[in-house]
Image (tube, grey):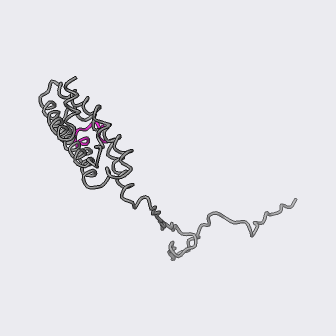
């Protein structure tokens, strides 16, 4: 019985081919067809949307990032978030745009919770933010904070009734600031 030898097919491709080492020669892996060479180059492209370049959407994004930080567990983070909101509102025309109808309720919702905060720096930043809102929000016939006065006064009165003296003093600062713009509303609130 004669065994037939299996011949290798010439068109069969091999995944890896080992370069045979020859005596006295070194293998240059960079020039070798089968050397360990990995191409690590890449190309990056960017998208520029017109909405990203407009200032009003940029302000909205900044405010949206700062609002959750006003409820952070760290008092320094809360204080810096309120300070950032104050800077944004005082340096831009956020309250004059139509976007203030959507942004302002969110700001007031977060600020009202910080009126009676335990940390002094948070409360002082709340006072500063509300003062900026009062100054910037007087846009004609009706002040932009008029719809929110009841809820603000509720939290301010709650802070006035706190056992800690510092909370009551900050609440008095808020009452003093609100008396400039809403004297009849505050007088009516304390009459009843």
Q: Using the image, determine if residue 171 lies above or below residue 104.
A: above
Q: Position of residue 6 (x, y in %)?
A: 79, 63
Q: Quadrant of residue 79?
A: top left
Q: Which residues are magenta?
A: 69-79
Q: Quadrant of the N terminus?
A: bottom right
Residue 181 horizontal side relative to residue 43, left or right: left
Q: Using the image, determine if residue 183 lies above or below residue 15.
A: above
Q: Position of residue 42 (x, y in %)?
A: 48, 66
Q: Quadrant of residue 101?
A: top left
Residue depicted at x 43% and y 58%:
51
Residue depicted at x 48% and y 67%:
43
Q: Position of residue 54 (x, y in %)?
A: 39, 60
Main SS class of the magenta portion in the image: helix
Identify which residue, 100 or 38, lies in the foreground: 100
Q: Using the image, determine if residue 92 lies above or below residue 104.
A: below
The question of residue 90 being in magenta is answered with: no
Q: Position of residue 105 (x, y in %)?
A: 35, 40
Residue most toward the front? Answer: 141
Residue depicted at x 18% and y 24%:
161
């Amino acid at each position: 019985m004669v065994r037939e030898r299996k011949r290798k097919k010439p068109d069969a491709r091999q995944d890896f081919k080992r370069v045979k080492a020859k005596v006295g020669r070194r293998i240059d892996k960079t020039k070798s067809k089968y050397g360990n060479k990995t191409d690590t180059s890449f190309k990056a492209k960017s998208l520029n949307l017109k909405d990203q370049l407009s200032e009003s959407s940029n302000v909205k994004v900044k405010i949206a990032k700062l609002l959750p930080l006003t409820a952070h567990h760290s008092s320094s983070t809360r204080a810096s978030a309120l300070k950032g909101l104050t800077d944004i509102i005082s340096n831009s025309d956020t309250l004059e745009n139509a976007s203030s109808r959507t942004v302002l309720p969110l700001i007031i919702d977060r600020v009202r919770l910080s009126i009676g905060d335990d940390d002094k720096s948070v409360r002082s930043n709340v006072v500063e933010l509300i003062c900026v809102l009062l100054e910037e929000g007087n846009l004609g016939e009706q002040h932009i904070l008029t719809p929110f006065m009841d809820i603000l006064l509720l939290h301010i009165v709650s802070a006035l009734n706190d056992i800690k003296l510092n909370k009551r003093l900050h609440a008095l600062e808020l009452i003093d600031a609100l008396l400039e713009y809403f004297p009849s509303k505050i007088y009516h609130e304390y009459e009843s």
